[in-house]
Amino acid sequence: MQAIGNREQGNMSRRLLAASVACLSMLGLAGCRQDMHDQPKFFPQRGTNFYADGRSVRPQALGTVARGQEDEGSYYRTGLINGAEGDGLPVPLTADLIERGQERYNIYCTSCHSRTGNGRGMVVMRGFFPAGNLHTERLRSAPLGHFFNVISNGYGAMPDYQGQVTVEDRWAVVAYIRALQLSQHATTADAGGAKIEKMEDVEKAEGLSANFVKEWDLPATAGQIQKSQVMAAPLPQPMPQPAADAAKPAQVSEANPKSAPLASALPAGAKPTAATAAAAKTEASASVPSAAAPHAAAGDVANGQKLYTANCSVCHQPTRQGMPPMIPSLVGIVARVGAAHIHAQVANGSPTSKPPMPAFPQLSNENVNDIVAFLAASK
C-alpha cells in the first residue's frame, strides 16, 4: 500500500510540473507580440505609399526657413565677401568672446600650432606636417576672414573643422588668434597703460630653460630639415646664360681644322685625321648647351625665395621636396611643366587635388616670375 501511494504522489508531482511549464509557455507566447516590430514607419531612401508623391523623405515646406538658411552665403557663415576673404568681426567683441575663443583654440588648435601660435605643437614635434606660424608677417596682416575660411575648409595638410566647431565658436577662435598675435607685439598704449613684460623676462622669473619661448627646431625627417639648416643654406645663384655666339656648335672639317677645339693640340703642319675630327665634334657639342635645354625664367631669384618661403613652403617645404604623395615635390618643376603651367596653378589653384591647393590672387605676374626663377635656379 505504501508503494502505491508513493507512485501516485510521484505522478501528481509530474502532472503539476507539466502544468506549470504549459502555463509559463502560454504566458511567454502571449508576450511575443509583433506590434513593435511591425509598426508603421519610414525607412531612409525608400519610397512609401503613405504620401501621394511616393516619397518618405519630405521636401521642405514652402514658406519655411531651416536653421542656418537665414543667412546662407553671408560673411558671417563663410568669411567671404564677393568670393574674397573679408576683414572685420561680424559678432560683438567682448571679453567673454575672447575667453571662449581661447578655450576652443586650446582644445582644437594647440596640438599643431602650440599655445603660443608658433606652429610647433606637440604632434608637429613628433613628426606630423609642420603647422603655420601665426606670428609671421603674412598671417599677422591676413584678414580675419582668412582664418575663418581656413578653420571652416582646411588649408594644405590642415583638415576642416566645420563639423567640430560651430560658426559662433569659429569666430571666437578668430578673435582669440588676433588677440594672440597682438599680444606678441603689444605696447603700453595697447594695454591701456598696463605693464608690458617681455617673454624673456617672464622666462627668467619662472625659472624656465633658456630660449623656452623661442621657436623650437623640428626633428629632421624625410622631406624635412630643421629651420636652422634652411636659414644657413646659401642662396641659389641663377643659372649662367650661354652667350649669343655660342648657340651654334663649332663645325669641324678637314678644310678648316683650326675651327675645332682640338686643332691647337695637333702638331704644327699636321693634318687632322677622321678620328681627331670626330673627337673635336664630340668636345664641341659637349661644351655648348643644348638649344632644347630649359632656361631659368627672367625674374629676381632672391625675391622669389622670399615669396616662396612666405606662400609655398608651408606645404611644399623649405626644401621644395613637398610631402609625397599628398603634396608634390617642386624640385625640377620648371623643367617638367614649364612656367606657364606654374602661373596657371598659382592663379587658379587646384581645388580637385587632395588636399586642394588654394589660389594666390595676391601674387602678381612679376611675383610668380620671381618664384619660377627661384625654382629654376634651385637644385
Image (spheres, rainbow, N blue to C red):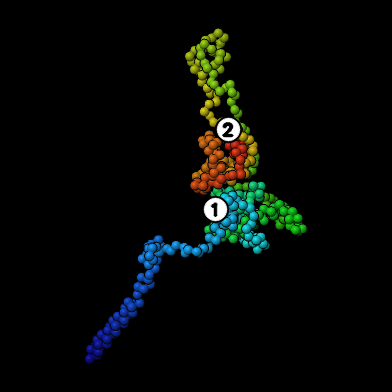
* Residue at 24%, 86% in the rendered image: 7
**Lower position in the chain sequence, tag 1 or tag 2:** 1
Q: Amino acid at mark 1?
A: Asn
Please say if 251 is above or below 205. Answer: above
Q: Residues within 10 Å of mark 1 (few under 14, many from 20)?
A: some
SS class of the residue under badge 1? helix
Could you tell me if residue 126 is visible in this image? no
Q: Above or below — where is 258 with respect to 211?
A: above
Residue in view at x 42 percent, y 63 percent? 57
Left or right: where 156 falls relative to 9: right
Looking at the picture, tell me which residue is in the foreground, 131 or 224: 131
Most distant residue in the front direction = 63
Task: Tell me where residue 326 appears, x and y as whole percent.
Answer: 51, 46
Q: Quadrant of residue 371?
A: top right
Residue 153: image tag? 1
Eyeballing the image, is 72 above or below 27?
Answer: above
